[in-house]
Amino acid sequence: MRKTTRKAWALAAGVTSIALVATACSSSDDPGEGDETADGGNITLTVATFNEFGYTDEMFDRYEAEHPGVTIEQKVAATSNEARENLNTRLAAGSGTADIEAIEVDWLPELLQYPDYFEDLSSPEVEGRWLDWKVQQATTADGKLIGYGTDIGPEGIAYRADLFQAAGLPADREAVAELFGGESATWEKFFEVGKTYTSATGKPFFDSAAAIYQGMVNQEEAAYEDPDSGDVIALENPRVKEMYEQVTTAAVGDNLSAHFEQWQPDWQNAFQNDGFAVMLAPGWMLGVIAGNAAGVTGWDLADVFPGGAGNWGGSFLTVPSQGANVEAAKELAAWLTAPEQQIEAFQNKGTFPSQVEALESDEIKSATNEFFNNAPVGEILANRAQGVVVPFKGPQYFTVQDAINNAITQVDVNGADAAAEWATFEGVVQGLG
Amino acid sequence: MATSTTQSRAGRRLPDSPRTPRRVGFSQKLSRWDVKVSPYLYISPFFILFGLTGLFPLAYTAYVSVYDWHLLGGQGDFVGFENFAFVFQEPNFWKGLRNTFSIFLLSTIPQLMVAIVLAALLDANLRAKTFWRMGVLVPYVIAPVAVSLIFGKIFADQSGLANSILGTFGVEPIRWHGSVLPSHMAVATMVNFRWTGYNTLILLAAMQAVPRELYEAAVIDGATRLRQFFSITIPQIRPTLIFVVITSTIGGLQIFDEPRLFDQIGQGGPGRQWMTVTMYIYELGFGNQKSFGRAAAVAWVLFLIILAVGLLNFWLTQRIASDATPQARKSRRKKVKR
């Protein structure tokens, strides 16, 4: 009897230790920069971004040439979720962040609660560089600026002219803008055009219901949180449920959606197979479309957006305080977000600048995009930036958005029941805090 | 060992006792310490290491789990078992538990069965033995990220290889990401691909150590290959089998890489179709909630579950394998007598 208990204990200890060793093994470590010395020596600056920022190796080479001793390494995460988790983990660990970390406006508010992790970037040199609301988003209550604005995301409608034509719809970009209602375009009208297209061709109209919802919610002044109290009002706000129902009905009820989840392999492949005819296209999406649809002709950009202007995304460059070369990193971040470089990034990947000077520049105004049938993308996006409502996004914004995004994806992609998924979403929101 | 030490000390003290010594020489004191302390010192490295890497994290996780602890904000108020209570009423926790066990069963059972059979085949007299033996280990060498990328393409819902192959047989496309069970099967396939060879080699090593005379005797007795496998091989490799089962249990219940990399977002699907408990811990700690307290609570629950399942498996394997053991032992004794 006694022997068995002792044996059991030994076994328990063994199992425990193996379990713990196995756990310890799963942590991944990042190779640190080898040649880091103090000021004056050779330094390596890492720049961590996600999706498309439009910064090219050629730009970094130029900077390196102007700043002897500086080497720049770029790390690109596939999605903003991934970049966010990386950053949070490393901030908490106290080491391992890149010298410059890009953050997206949706998860900026939660980091603004802990400004101590970041350098104060405000300086007379960069004052007045950005649109006021862009600066406001990255400024704490006591006036600390934690991020330099990179791009903003005014949205137009990217569409396949050839598919429109085949469906008997106008293909010319002015006519398409009129088709969607021109200045008075609404989401109802958008879905109506979709029904016309789908009934004519039997093919899906847009790529993903979650993407359409994203376009809608970015027009709400305060969708999920009360700007005054900071309370989560996602369930009390009738607009949230209205939009949810509108999108899921259009996507599944009217079958306008191609039922994809953005960024997944199926979605990426669909660009090559005429999977859908329209996409909501903020500036940075143009580069993504051109990349996924390489070799496909017919994409164009219409100067119109349902429900007034909309801004989807937009990012900032921050300098985490834990970095070894904070001053050099600040300098590089300021350089990257200066009007000239942002104009270049726009020309590379369509990331639309947030700098006042850049927005007024001829390069932007006259910019065209060959892939989009030489559309005057600079002019169109500048028009689309007029009257953008800046939604209030508090610390819980990302979480709520993530939850409703999952619910819509479940309904749209996986054929789940809309009411049941709404209940799941309610559960998540109620469990916050 | 302990008894012999006391005896010798008592034996030494006996003649001294009437004198009641006032002063004890330092060297004598030292040697007494030596007898008392040294054995513990000799075995201490293991315990120190175990304490540092095993016990301390375990205890510290328990400590964190009763606090309100934010990833960026740090330690907060003491909340008692609130974190546990929260976690138990979260539907995602139960989904994670369901997924973990489902993926665990779908991967571990076929994996171990295939591994045993493969090992038995490799144990036979083959041409180019080393080539085949190394071959089974190749998948294990491939980085999990690469495995996930490949299998992500194979199991893409609409444009994947798996569905187009099934399509040629007239099977409706399977929603590898959308539905629960297919997603588990896809993830389990990734796990099996990676770990079967690894387990095969361990079992093969054990089979190599089985005395060949046993097989010779069995052949003389007229036992078939199958009979040899069940009556000699399996009982003889029992300790290794137990080891493999327990490590697979631990690995299977902590599964993280493959399901996390099964899609780009890494949350285990929009409806958490394939989110495992470990992924849930990660999500609580580093995802939207950033609550280390809750993550630690789940980590502890998972630890207890693994312990329980590990013990159950130990008991089961012993039971299964022990049916044949007495015979095997008997046969060996017989052989010795001969």
Image (tube, coloured by chain):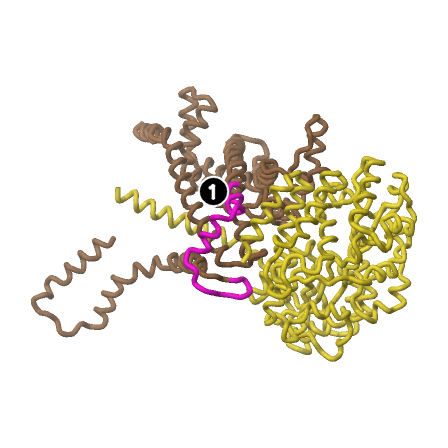
Mark 1 sits on what residue? B249
Q: Nearer the viewer, residue A423 or B287?
A: A423
Is B75 inside the magenta-drawn segment?
A: yes
Residue B31: quarter of image: bottom left
Residue A98 falls left or right of residue A62: left
Question: Which residue occupies 67% across, 60% down?
Answer: A222
Q: Give the color of chain A as drawn.
A: yellow
Above or below — where is A228 with respect to A208? Answer: below
Question: Which residue occupies 40% across, 25% down?
Answer: B217
* Rendering coords of residue B118 (x, y %): 54, 33
Is B95 inside the magenta-drawn segment?
A: yes
* Rendering coords of residue A184 (x, y %): 84, 54
Q: Nearer the viewer, residue B34 or B297?
A: B297
| Image quarter of the C terminus of chain B | top left
Residue A305: quarter of image: bottom right
**What residue range appears in magenta?**
B70-98
Question: Which residue occupies 25% across, 68% down?
Answer: B30
Q: Chain of mark 1?
A: B
Above or below — where is A411 with respect to A17? Answer: above
The residue at the far left in this view is B18
* Rendering coords of residue A201 (x, y %): 84, 36
Residue B327 falls left or right of residue B70: left
The amino acid pointed to by label 1 is Thr
Q: Give the color of chain B as drawn.
A: brown
Q: Residues within 10 Å of mark 1 (few under 14, many from 20)?
A: many
Above or below — where is B191 with respect to A220? Answer: above
Q: Label 1, secondary structure: give it.
A: helix
